Image (tube, rainbow, N blue to C red):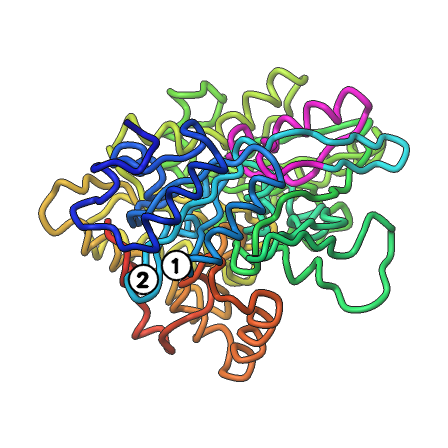
Amino acid sequence: MTGGVGPLATAGRELTGPETSLLARLEGILGGDGLRTGHLGRATYRRDASFLNADPLAVALPRTVEQTAQVLRACRDHGIPFTPRAAGTGLAGGATPTGEAGVRPVVVSVARMDRLRQLDVPNRRAWVEPGLVNARLGKAAATHGLRFAPDPASQIAATLGGNVATNAGGIHVLTYGVMSQHVLAVELMDADGVVHVLDGARAEQAGLDLRGVTVGGEGTLGIVVGACLRLLPSPPAVGTLLAGFPSLDAAAAAVGALVVSDRLPDAVELMDARAVSLVEGYAQAGYPQDAAAVLLLEYEGLPAGVDAGVVTADHLAREHGATSVVRADGPDQRARIWKGRKAVAGAIAKRAPDFYLQDVVVPRSRLGEMLDAVVAIGERERLEILTVVHAGDGNLHPFVLFDRREEGMIDRVFAAGHDIVATALSLDGTVTGEHGVGIEKRDFLGEVFDADDLAVQRAVRDAIEPSGLANPDKVLPTTVGCGEARMVPEGAWV
């Protein structure tokens, strides 16, 4: 039994009167197919792609905006918080259903709201529902010579609502930026079930940028039930290079030279030797197996500009010690090269049963230091860590590989995660580039912002969402100072 309010809904304790009343009301709104209250039905929604768990009261799966509004009004009337969720590909616990003071929230999944409402080709924009998968929008736009630029590695599963909520980036972030550069309007539903259209589809807007405040809000300001997204013309030409280097420092130095050259690449990705070795057998991407690091470089635009960029990159790579430089000879080889980069998380299953993925940013000039520090942290904690980097903007993704069944392993993993974040901060970096803050990075924000900054952010959140029911316990810290930050916050478990 996955729906209903029967005995399995108690999760080892008796439901309170308000909880029982709420579940009955939600079942009336959604029907048995749209509500999960049983133990197994809830278990799938205890976590996102992080491994921080919390048990929700129930899972609501509305199909329409009106059903979503009814669900939120029911939660409001019973004083029960809600946690928005879509595909669950988030990596910082933003969709983990924690609640303050032991109150379990209702997970509100918008995954069934997945329509492409309008593809406005003349104006190069698309109105989408939050459950629409990123790659589906890209495929639809491509038939009209258009593209949706943000391309996270998880784009074949990640939804656009989640991308908006976390201000996701992707491989081409160096040129095209993160989601906030591509969101023209947000339809935000508050805890009263009222939809507010923030900004609009016009090229420019007067007044305060409330759309910008909402992008990256991670559900703490309400639920994104729709968005208008900017589309761009597909480039007439693309040039892709794969370069191998004898050391991480050499690859990092080449990145520094590339991003200040007269031909800025549209994508600069770095993978260390462990990542290269892992994915090559999985994706047959053609990566050089003798390299300590590889760079994946891409130029887009008019053919002459692309060719000039490729020549510049080839020269700079070799000048910085590249042992091999290969240009993709067509779309098939280009697809294989990028398949390897995007397949890292999937390939890890061949090596380890668990991984813990970090997401930190450092200035490009400190990239070599940060890469060396990650290696040292892995050695100190006796952990295998492989690293991939959106190198153009200094956004590192260290993957910590482990087996949680090993005694004491979780403590070492979280110690490594803490040290990676702390090191990035010490190098004038920040705690997240595209995965969001969620609960995992929440307590580190006291190291990024001072008390006045955080007070303003709390005031903005409280002004937009005064009920406090929207995804409580996320983003804004409950402690101050890196030394006090917890990688596993209260209310969650591994």
Q: Position of residue 54 (x, y in %)?
A: 29, 50
Q: Which residue is mark 2?
A: 418
Q: Outermost residue, left direction? A: 407
Amino acid type shown at disc 2: His
Between 35 and 311, which is closer to the camera in this rendering? Answer: 35
Dot 1: element:
loop
Name the secondary structure under disc 2.
helix
**Residue 408 drawn in magenta:** no
249 and 142: which is toward the camera: 142
Residue in the picture at 30% in, 62% down: 489
> In the image, 200: left or right of 354?
right
> What is the number of callouts on the image?
2
Residue at the outermost right position: 122
Q: Is residue 149 magenta?
A: yes
Q: Is residue 456 left or right of residue 54?
A: right
Check the image and report above or below for 357 versus 304: below
Is 49 placed above or below 307 here? below
Left or right: residue 138 versus residue 3 is right
Q: Residue visible at 27% across and 55% down?
A: 16
Residue 259: in sight, yes or no? Answer: yes
Q: Given the image, on which type of amino acid does mark 1 rest?
A: Ile
Q: Mark 1 sits on what residue?
A: 439
Name which residue lies at 51% across and 34% down.
154
Task: Tell me the CA gap for discs 1 and 2.
Answer: 13 Å
Residue visible at 32% across and 59% down?
103
Range covered by the magenta-colored residues: 128-157
Nearer the observer, 5 or 313: 5
